[in-house]
Image: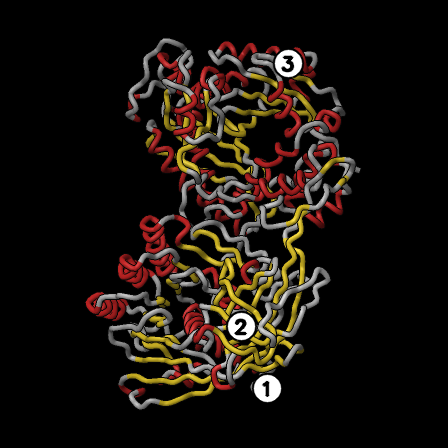
Amino acid sequence: MAAVPRRDGEARAWLESIGRQAQPVTLARDRSISLPGDLGAVVPGAALQRGATLTVAGPVGAGATSLALELAAAATAAGEWAAAVDLHGTLGGEAACAAGVALERFAVVRQVSPDRWATVVAALLEGVTLVLAEVPRGVKIGDARRLVARARERGSVLVALETGARWTGDAQLRLHAAGGSWHGLASGAGLLTGRARSVRVDGQGEAARSRVVALVG
Amino acid sequence: MESRVTRTFALWCPAWAVATACRADPALVGAPVAVVERGKRGLVVRAASVEARTEGVAVGLRRREAESRCAGLVVLDADPAAEARTFEAVARAMDPITPGVVLERPGVLTFPTRGPSRYFGGDDVLSTRVLDAVHATGVVGARAGVADGRFAARLASRIAGPGGARLVEPDGSPAFLAPWPVGVLRDVVDARDAAAHGPSWRGQPEGTAKSTRRGEDLVSLLVRLGIPTLGDFAALPAAAVLARFGADGAHAHRLALGLDEHAAPPAPPPPDLVETCELDPPATRVDEAAFAAKGLADRLLERLEVLGLACTQVVVEAETEHGEHLIRCWRHEGALTPAALVSRVRWQLDGWLRGVASDCEPGIPARSERDHEWEHGGLSGGLTLVRLAPDRVVPATARQLGFWGGDAAAHDRADRALARLQGMLGHDSVVTAVLAGGRAPSERVRWLPWGEPRDDGLAVGAEVPAWPGAVPGPSPARVHAPPVPAELLDSDGQPVCVSGRGDASAEPAQLRCAALPDGGGAVTAWAGPWAHDLRWWVPDDGRTRCEPGYQARGRSLLHVTRRRRALWQLVVGADDAQIACLVVVEAGRAGVEAVYD
């Protein structure tokens, strides 16, 4: 019987790849969330280190929100929980779903006044693995430092989305969505299909040298 | 051919919560009393005494509103355990008349009339006997109804006079049901729905998960469709109702037709599902017995779950050390959830153990609430055996948890943190998205407060119904609802308008909006407009034009209003920093509805 070739090789390979996606968060030795596909090229090691703080910035329309949602999708795909602080109630739920976020494990907190913002983010860092927080104006530098420390202590990932104001605390990785051109739409014809976009990556350690990564889609 | 509908007797004691309170404290008799419970909108009235009702206090009012309507209103908190305990006296009074008593909830019981009615010589004699027996226990104002089918019998008891009976002649249920408004279906559908999405893993107490609005949705939709009565609803073809309203609608339709709730009589559950627990030493305290019963209930539901079954009717049996054998049957509109089953078993054991007999004698002061100070009401000793037998099982339709499950501890941690934020910021501040059908991006997602049951009608990969006029392509990551005011101009600097036929007045050349960087810019590519009429069924909200009334089935149904809206997909800006957005033009005004960020 040993000579009979396995006929389920494809299925086994598929199962293994799913297993790899789910694996890192359950093992203590590799405390990271793996990033699939293009995103893996953006972040060194193709994984988000738990306890890290990232910033995602970019002008309106450049793709910063989509990039942040893709990070949240990577967390929920690994079975973890994610939450977003949505200052203006504008986050697109359908876009989150399209980015691959498991909506049943993705909570959105709205109507957060700036003076409570730090408390809310701290409470979320206690409870969920990835917190996507839009940064309001006037966050105190002390609050920002405390949040970075809280994320490190709890092993959660803090993604500061710099749509309103800059993040004044530390960050291991700073992603800057630089936009790009859209495909599929002409004057009075066609439909938006996708875009070429690029992300500038700065950071500490492995990512210390600034580089620009082009993403497809 | 349909199986014959079971002729059923229903006994209804109105405002049972108030009757229980009056029994515990005789000083309340004759006073305006309202019993409140915590609902989604805060404390709302669940039951009110006759005196309070004449002052305008109605079930469902908020506590404050009720107090403002009736000066001197005595407001009490609901105590379901006490209600069930006192109702046991009524259930016991039925024992000499029929063995088949089914408790629906405290205050309502039903039984099939076939045996007892023949024995006593007719439905009217039977009703008299039952009402006399109930009256003898000290309960006044109980009402009886007899009809084909449980639903019709319960409605018949609602229109019987106090202390009277309403008999619906055999085969008369469809005609009896026909004039009732469809609103009576609301609670039935809600109970089914709450059971299907019940508190399976959240550990919520029963009742808090009943925030679903399926019943309300169905009823309001039927009314808007011009189907105000059960008769009109029953006249629709069953297949069409199933196709349009799903399983809930089909269930409601069967009830409206006067049929039994199950299309085929459910198969008797296998006898080996009975769970038994012997108590040694005999349990003489409610908490001892209830603790044993909790394990029993969990084991029973676990075994049923493995078989893919859910239980809608359960028999609770107990034996005492002197050989007494007690049996009571409890029924639930939907399937019994663990919390619901445990509370029913607890109520029942409580009723047996804590002297119901002495409760029935008026004038006895309120007893001490300490558990060990009960009198053996009709029982000569402690309980030695508790048995749970599922009496009626149906296929389980509850939601299945994800295959990968997830870490239960992580789940609890997230739940706690989010519940804390809800306490800090308000219930509606922490939300979760559910995909819904719609054309504009803001309509395609519903945001539900965290913790409310998600009905994933449109899960990922599910077949999404077609929405003609919806904007295809990628989903925008920033959605502005309401749209941010903007100016969409043509090459001459005039605003671009959309005609009633959906044609644009000119090609858009310029978009100005405060929400875009640099205030907008030149339009480099565009598609649209996609025009559609919006919410024409909603009454006029001032912004829209109202057209003459619409006649449907001889009734003036609604005012038809038209909101014509046109959507454009635009790309603004130069090559390296293009911004794609969705612009809506409505009533001559433009706005940025979404940005592809």
Query: Which kind of residue does numbered mark 2 sit on?
Result: Leu
Q: Is residue B493 above or below residue B122?
A: below
Where's residue B113, x and y in %? 66, 21
Query: Which kind of residue does numbered mark 1 sit on?
Result: Pro
Q: Nearer the viewer, residue B358 or A41?
A: A41
**SS for callout 1:** loop
Residue marked by disc 1 = A5
Q: Point out the residue furthest to the left here.
A: A142
**SS for callout 3:** helix
Determine the CA span between mark 1 and mark 3.
77 Å
Q: Which image quadrant for residue B207? A: top left
Residue A22 seen in this snapshot: no
| Identity of the residue drawn at 47% across and 38% down | B341
Around disc 2, counting alpha carbons within 10 Å, would you say few (fewer than 14), some (14 to 19), or many (20 or more)? many
Tell me the quarter of the image containing the N terminus of chain B.
top right
Q: Nearer the viewer, residue A64 or B121?
A: A64
Both on one chain, marks 3 and 2? yes
**Left-right relation of B295 to B121:** left
Determine the CA span between mark 2 and mark 1.
63 Å
Where's residue B478, x and y in %? 48, 67
Q: Chain of mark 1?
A: A
Mark number, residue B126:
3
**N-terminal label among 3 and 2:** 3
Q: Chain of mark 2?
A: B
